[in-house]
Image (cartoon, rainbow, N blue to C red):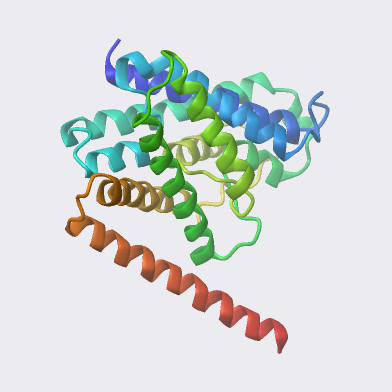
Amino acid sequence: MSEFAAELLGTMILIILGAGVVAGTELKKSKAAGAGWVLVTIGWGLGVTMGVYAAGNISDAHLNPAVTLGFAAIGEFPWAKVPAYISGQILGAIIGAMIVYFQYLPHWRETEDKGAKLGVFATGPAVRSYPSNLVSEIIGTFVLVMGLLFIGANEFTEGLNPAVVGLLIVAIGMSLGGPTGYAINPARDLGPRIAHAILPITGKGGSDWSYSPIPVIGPIIGGVYGAVFYHAFFDGNMGASFWIMSAVVAIILATAFVTEQHRDKHAVS
């Protein structure tokens, strides 16, 4: 199997299990309906674990463009392979989302809530405030990529790494996922959002393309910054990329802070 195919297969499995648990909790007349956020985070964590097991021996199971770009930014992955990995990830996410559609085929008709249907496929903010939503995705993916590098720096019993990565996903979801649904992966959001747009889902609404740049741009910034931050502080390589990314993140944080302060003043008045 090629590395492209491995990334496609691993990401497909990730989405089948991840989007599948959201469908089970959100769609009407599912036996898991209303099971809640804890089940969703565990389902996503297990989905990542199974995806990593599927692809890890072939492609190292990035399953996430933010991870691929972050590792490439610090020289841990060749830039020449980046396009094949990312295209495999996005295509795998689209296919995985389509499989979830067929798994829950009669439940789309039973569910009137258009937002719930979109939520099976794509993330959305609890409070729509784009600068703050961007910050949430940056922080979540920063923790993800730093966590992956932490895990890789330690010795685990053979075969245990994917399970530890899954626990990292659960921890991020429980602690940081509330504001935006923690995409922390451009392929995880963009691929299924494309599937939502093209599938004949009964009674669906729009695919919320106005929000779609946030779960793509945020994870890329957070993933690259997580990698260069780790490289700077743990490997002692505090180069130009660290300072540039630090400045970018600082500007975004300042913008989000000013935006929320402005909204607070208007809310009070």
- Which residue appears at 63% of the width and 20% of the height? 102
Measured along the vertical axis of the image, is residue 195 above or below residue 118?
A: above
Question: In which quarter of the view is residue 99 placed?
Answer: top right
Q: Residue 179 in the image: state x and y as whole percent.
A: 61, 55
- Which residue appears at 40% of the width and 29% of the height? 63
Q: Residue 3 in the image: state x and y as whole percent.
A: 28, 19
Question: In which quarter of the view is residue 84 placed?
Answer: top left
- Which residue appears at 42% of the width and 18% of the height? 9
Q: Is 192 on the left or on the right of 118, as rendered?
A: left
**Image quarter in which the N terminus is found:** top left
**Image quarter in which the C terminus is found:** bottom right
Measured along the vertical axis of the image, is residue 242 above or below residue 157?
A: below
Measured along the vertical axis of the image, is residue 138 above or below residue 252?
A: above
Give the tally of numbered discs.
0
Q: Residue 167 in the image: state x and y as whole percent.
A: 55, 31
Measured along the vertical axis of the image, is residue 91 above or below residue 240?
A: above
Q: Residue furthest top?
A: 1
Q: Is 113 on the left or on the right of 211, as rendered?
A: right
Can residue 184 be seen from the camera position used here?
yes
Can residue 206 be seen from the camera position used here?
no
- Which residue appears at 37% of the width and 63% of the height? 249
Q: Residue 200 in the image: state x and y as whole percent.
A: 61, 31
